[in-house]
Amino acid sequence: MTAEHHGHRHHIWRFFRAGGFDQVRLDDGRAVVALSELDQKLWVALACPTRGIEFDERTLDLLDHDHDGRIRAPEMLAAARWTCGLLKNPDVLARGSDKLALAEIDDAQPEGKELLASARAILRMLGKGDADAASLQDAMDVEHIYDGTKFNGDGIIPVDAAEDADTESALQTIIDCIGAEKDRSGKPGVSQASADRFFAEAEALAAWHAEAEAKPAALLPLGEATPALAARLKEVAPKLDDFFTRCRLAAYDETAARALGPSAERYAALGAETLAPASADVAALPLAQVAAGAELSLVDGVNPAWRRALEALRHDVVVPLMGARDHLSEADWEEIKARLAAYEAWAARKPATSLSALAPERVRHLVRSGVKARIDALIAKDKALEPEMNAISRLEMLIRFQRDLLPLLNNFVSFRDFYRRTGKAVFQAGTLYLDARSCDLCLKVEDPDQHAQLATLSRIYLAYCRCTRAKGAETMTIAAAFTAGNSDNLMVGRNGVFYDRKGRDWDATIVKIIDHPISIRQAFWLPYRQAARAISQQVQKFAAARSAASQSRAATTVVQLAPDGAAQPAQHSQAFDAARFAGIFAAIGLAIGAIGTAIASVITGLLNLTWWQLPLAILGVILLISGPSVLIATLKLRHRNLGPILDACGWAVNTRLKINIPFGGSLTATAQLPENAERSLSDPYAEKKRRWPWYLAALVIAALIAAAAWKFGLFAKLKL
């Protein structure tokens, strides 16, 4: 359906400015109809993953036509074109409802007519024949929709769809042999492919059985017991061949008879063991004593391990085929094998099939009864309903797209929800509470290390947190952006609480940090904090060194035991060096003098300025200290870009998604007291205030004022 169909031949696009670039406004169905006309260079994103974002997964899967786990711009355009083509008024997309009025379906189109008929059929099956709208729940109520009909257009026939007992039995037999396929209602059934395969195997198996029916004497010389007896004969046949071969060798050479029988040593080894007829060592011996031209006795003088097998052979095979006898000659054995050769060849031709467990009579009945034609007719009857029944699934898709398409486009073609701050974008996983702040820009990530390789280009301070709930049964990893406050108390191992989009709380622990400037305030105070930290570290090092030296000196005064057992104090290792300490004191004095000279020079320089230059000089000193840090931070903060973070999550971002300083401040909220809150400033555990710093500050200010008064001649004027 084209834009001209809905009367929007020349759509006037409207844009809004956010994030430092223009984004298209998609406020109604007319914009969705004309979406294919919008240059894709103006789209914010061209692809996104179907997982890891906060959106209905079923809708995303329906949009993903090629099922590759990603939704691309062509798939979005196809969905928009299909949806708008089936609606009389595409502006219903703006309502985002999960109920579709039947009057809104454009039945002037063939597909729309099918959808309308399907919607009415669904409502009728659900007992809502008078309803004028179909809900998403109605379209998804598959169990009840298909429960009232045996034919649902999927080409799979359940057993209860049979119209007679013979067909029902045949369907069950197919399921037992081939396996079941579930139809749309969830019932086990038979498809055309399964039926064709079953009856093809049945015909081949019936033809194979027919050979034995035509030549029973040749193929089944032992009657119906032939297969079982032939299988039993295979067990003893190798030993029979072995015996007669040994006898032929003995006839060939008389000296071979003794060598081909068991040796005395072998019997001696057997004699040392506890023997049993079924022993493997006994069974390995020949069937009987080897001699030239010997016949095999089937009763006496045979290997005990094979006695019962030979008795069964005599009773079940030899007597029925050769007549009553107690001995078996080599010629008799060869004749028995020849009599069974035809059966062996016929058995080898048995088709490989899953119908082997069926009796021959059952196979013949299935082939000759015409039940296949009845099953084919049922499948054809079911397939005839395919267009109408397929429309049921398309109805669900239409209702979903009516509800979800426009919101998704506003998180794909434009990022309205993110930049307007009217709601959370689909890539925002929830809110992290940590360090007296709440971070709204949180994204799900699979691998923090891999994600960080690209995300660091965003110039955004990111804290990767491992989130767990239900005692670790559920886990996920998020990347949280800190865009307000400072990073003084953010470190790996800190814990917080993460609330997902469903309101569930997760334990969150920082596992990785990408360090970037967070705010201008942090950058301004950074040099002073670094200086204070450096001074603190130097003081701690000096104190630690002095403590170590004191402990070393104390160790030299340990008590030593005299030879007579009396305790004697240890002597100092060296005497007091007055010259050395005099040098140290002189050096300290020089340092203090240099510092004092520097301070005096600064004060003198300030006093040489006019009154209006003094604040400018102080401001210049502050700028000299904080200016570089603030400048670098400002440049980085102004160039923060959300794009690399989303690209690392699988998106295809099509533009530069700036997060400037004001917008970044809105993404992270710092702790503030509620409006009209009452505060008690009385702290019983507050540290006691010391007054001498204030006295010292007042003295310095007074000295500066006096110096300034003297500089500008105020004292001379007072004398006059």
Image: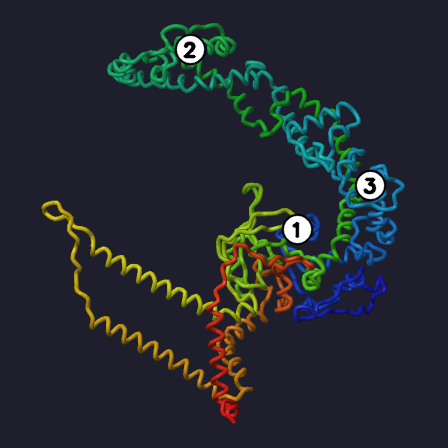
Upstream in sequence: badge 2 or badge 3: 3
Residue at image x 46%, y 19%? Answer: 234
202 and 400: which is toward the camera: 400
Q: Which residue is mark 1?
A: 501
Q: Is residue 413 visible?
A: no
Upstream in sequence: badge 2 or badge 1: 2
**Picture coordinates of residue 405 (x, y %)?**
74, 55
Look at the numbered disc 3 and give the secondary structure of its residue: helix
Name the side, left or right, on which 115 lies relative to 368. right
2 or 3: mark nearer the eye:
3
Q: How many marks?
A: 3
Q: Tag 1: Cα neighbours inside 10 Å, few (<14), some, or many (≥20)?
A: some
Residue at image x 76%, y 47%? Answer: 396
Q: Which of the 4 quarters of the picture holds residue 638? A: bottom right
- The residues tagged by marks 1 and 3 sit, at their Cα atoms, a distance apart of 33 Å
Residue at image x 85%, y 64%? Answer: 7
Name the side, left or right, on which 136 lies relative to 73. right
Classify the position of the N terminus by image quarter. Answer: bottom right
Q: Tag 2: Cα neighbours inside 10 Å, few (<14), some, or many (≥20)?
A: some
What amino acid does circle 2 point to?
Leu
Above or below for 161 versus 68: above
